[in-house]
Image (spheres, helix red, strand yellow):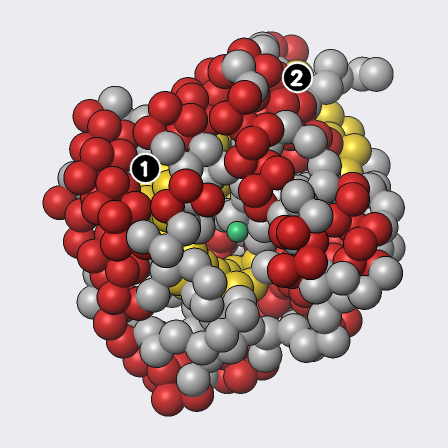
C-alpha cells in the first residue's frame, strides 16, 4: 500500500467537486449542485487535497512550478473525476452466495418456503459461525478490493450473520483486519440485531437482553464498532425493541442507525429521538413523518439494489423525500440474500430509472450525503482543500454517463487517502 505523497491529476474533462453550499447534508435543490469545473486539476499532498481548480491555474501555482519534478502527474485525458463513492450500507461478512435461494425465488418460492428449504439468512449464519476469522478476513478483503475497482473509497461494513457474541466479535475483527490492509476507509457497524437467531425463536426479549447487556458492552469495550444498527421491521425487531437497543448503544457510546420500512411501515418519531445517523430502506414510510425527518440531520438511505434483486415492482418514493427536504443517500446494501452488488454506479442507475432521481442527485446521494450518513462529512464526500484525497476516475466524458452505461464498470482508477487502486502507468 503506497501513498504517493505528491499527486497531481490534470486534464480532467469534468471535475465534480461537490463543494459545500450548505452546512448540513444536501437537501432539495442543493442535491443537484455538483460544483463542476471543466478542464480541471487536483493537487494532493500527504493523502489530503490541497488545491482544486482549472489545469491552467494549477500549473501557474508557484509551489507547483518549483516542485513539478517531485510530483507524480496523472493525465486524465478529458475524463470525469469525482469524489470516491461513500457506500454507507453493506453486509460484507458472509461465506457463500445464496444461489439456491436465487433460483427458488425465480421459480416463485416465497420467503418462508426458502427458509424451510434451509436457505435464507439462516444459511449465512451457519456459514459465519463455522468460519475461521482468517477465512472471513479474506472474504472481506476481496470485497474491499472490488469496491475500489468500482469507484468506492469509503464503506460502512456491518456484522450481523453471527448473532452470538463470539461470532459477532469474529465478524467485526475480520472487518478490522481487512480494513488495516486496505487504503480506503472502513466504518464498522455492529448488527447483532439483524434478526432473532433460530435458537431464540419466540424469545425475542431474551435476545434483545443479550444484545443490550452482553454484546454491546463487549463491542464497546473492544472499540471494534462505531455504530450499532437494528433491523426494525416485521419479522425482525419492533420499534419498542429498537428503542431499547438504541438506548443501550448510546449508553456505551455507540452511534445508532437502523433498517426501517423495507417490509412494513414503522412510525419514525420514537426512533428519531435517538438521533440516528441514518434510517435505511424507507420503502414504507408514513407521509406525516417526512417533515419531522426533514427537520432532523438523520439521512434517509435508499438501497434500490435490494428492490431490483428481489424483483419488486415498487421502489422507495425518492421524489417525495427530496421535495419534503429530507437528506437522502444511496448505498448498495451489498449482501448475499437481497443485494449482491458492489456497484454504486449500478445503484445510481436504478435510482435514476426507477426512483426518478436525476443523475446529479444520484451522485450527490452516493458521495457527500453518504458521508453525512456515516458522520464523516468533515473528511469525505467532496473535493475541497483539506479533505481526504479520495477520488474516482471514470472513463466517460460526461458525468451522466456513469448511471447511463448500466451494468458496465467504467471506473479506471480510484485514489484512496492518496493511494492509487492500481500501479500508475499500467
Ligand atoms: Zn442491510
Q: Is residue 399 visible?
A: no
Q: Is residue 351 visible?
A: yes
Query: For the point 77% across and 29% down, which residue is it?
Result: 75
Query: For the point 69% across and 53% down, which residue is it?
Result: 114
Sequence-wise, which precedes: disc 1 or disc 2? 2
Q: Quadrant of residue 76?
A: top right
Name the foreground residue: 319 vs 48. Answer: 319
Picture disc at residue 226: 1
Q: Is residue 375 left or right of residue 57?
A: left
**Quarter of the picture holding the C terminus:** top right
Say if 371 sits above or below 244 in the image. Answer: above
Ligand 1 has an atom within 8 Å of the beta carbon of the residue at disc 1: no
Q: Mark 2 = which residue?
A: 72
Q: Secondary structure at mark 1?
A: loop
Q: Is residue 412 left or right of residue 317?
A: right
Picture disc at residue 86: none
Q: Is residue 163 left or right of residue 401?
A: left
Name the foreground residue: 159 vs 379. Answer: 159
Amino acid at each position: 500500500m503506497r501513498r504517493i505523497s505528491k499527486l497531481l491529476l490534470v486534464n480532467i474533462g469534468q471535475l465534480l467537486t461537490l463543494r459545500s453550499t450548505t452546512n448540513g447534508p444536501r437537501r432539495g435543490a442543493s442535491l443537484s449542485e455538483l460544483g463542476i469545473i471543466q478542464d480541471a486539476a487536483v493537487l494532493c499532498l500527504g493523502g489530503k487535497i490541497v488545491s482544486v481548480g482549472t489545469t491552467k491555474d494549477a500549473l501557474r501555482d508557484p509551489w507547483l512550478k518549483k516542485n513539478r519534478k517531485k510530483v507524480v502527474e496523472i493525465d486524465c485525458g478529458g475524463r470525469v473525476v469525482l469524489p470516491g463513492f461513500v457506500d454507507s450500507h453493506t453486509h460484507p461478512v458472509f461465506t457463500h452466495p445464496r444461489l439456491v435461494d436465487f433460483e427458488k425465488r425465480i421459480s416463485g418460492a416465497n420467503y418462508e418456503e426458502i427458509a424451510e428449504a434451509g436457505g435464507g439468512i439462516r444459511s449465512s449464519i451457519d456459514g459465519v459461525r463455522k468460519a475461521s476469522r482468517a477465512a472471513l478476513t479474506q472474504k472481506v478483503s476481496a470485497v474491499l478490493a472490488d469496491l475500489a475497482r468500482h469507484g468506492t473509497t469509503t464503506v460502512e461494513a456491518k456484522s450481523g450473520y453471527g448473532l452470538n457474541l463470539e461470532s459477532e466479535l469474529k465478524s467485526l475483527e475480520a472487518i478490522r483486519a481487512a480494513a488495516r490492509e486496505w487504503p480506503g476507509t472502513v466504518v464498522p457497524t455492529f448488527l447483532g440485531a439483524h434478526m432473532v437467531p433460530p435458537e431464540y425463536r419466540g424469545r425475542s426479549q431474551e435476545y434483545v437482553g443479550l444484545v443490550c447487556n452482553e454484546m454491546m458492552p463487549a463491542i464497546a469495550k473492544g472499540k471494534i464498532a462505531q455504530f450499532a444498527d437494528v433491523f426494525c421491521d416485521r419479522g425482525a425487531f419492533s420499534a419498542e425493541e429498537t428503542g431499547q437497543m438504541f438506548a443501550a448503544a448510546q449508553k456505551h457510546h455507540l452511534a445508532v442507525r437502523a433498517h426501517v420500512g423495507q417490509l412494513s411501515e414503522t412510525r419514525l418519531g420514537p426512533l428519531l429521538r435517538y438521533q440516528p445517523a441514518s434510517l435505511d430502506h424507507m420503502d414504507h414510510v408514513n407521509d406525516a413523518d417526512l417533515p419531522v425527518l426533514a427537520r432532523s440531520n438523520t439521512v434517509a438511505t435508499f438501497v434500490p439494489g435490494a428492490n431490483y434483486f428481489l424483483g419488486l415492482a415498487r421502489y422507495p418514493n425518492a421524489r417525495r423525500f427530496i421535495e419534503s427536504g429530507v437528506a437522502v443517500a444511496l448505498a448498495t446494501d451489498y449482501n448475499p440474500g437481497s443485494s449482491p452488488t458492489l456497484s454504486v454506479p449500478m445503484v445510481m442507475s436504478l435510482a435514476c430509472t426507477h426512483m426518478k432521481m436525476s443523475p446529479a442527485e444520484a451522485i450527490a446521494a452516493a458521495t457527500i450525503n453518504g458521508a453525512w450518513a456515516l458522520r464523516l462529512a468533515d473528511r469525505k464526500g467532496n473535493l475541497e482543500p483539506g479533505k481526504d484525497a479520495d477520488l474516482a476516475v471514470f472513463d466517460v466524458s460526461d458525468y451522466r454517463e456513469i448511471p447511463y452505461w448500466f451494468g458496465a464498470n467504467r471506473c479506471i482508477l480510484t485514489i484512496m487517502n492518496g493511494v492509487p487502486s492500481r500501479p500508475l502507468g499500467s
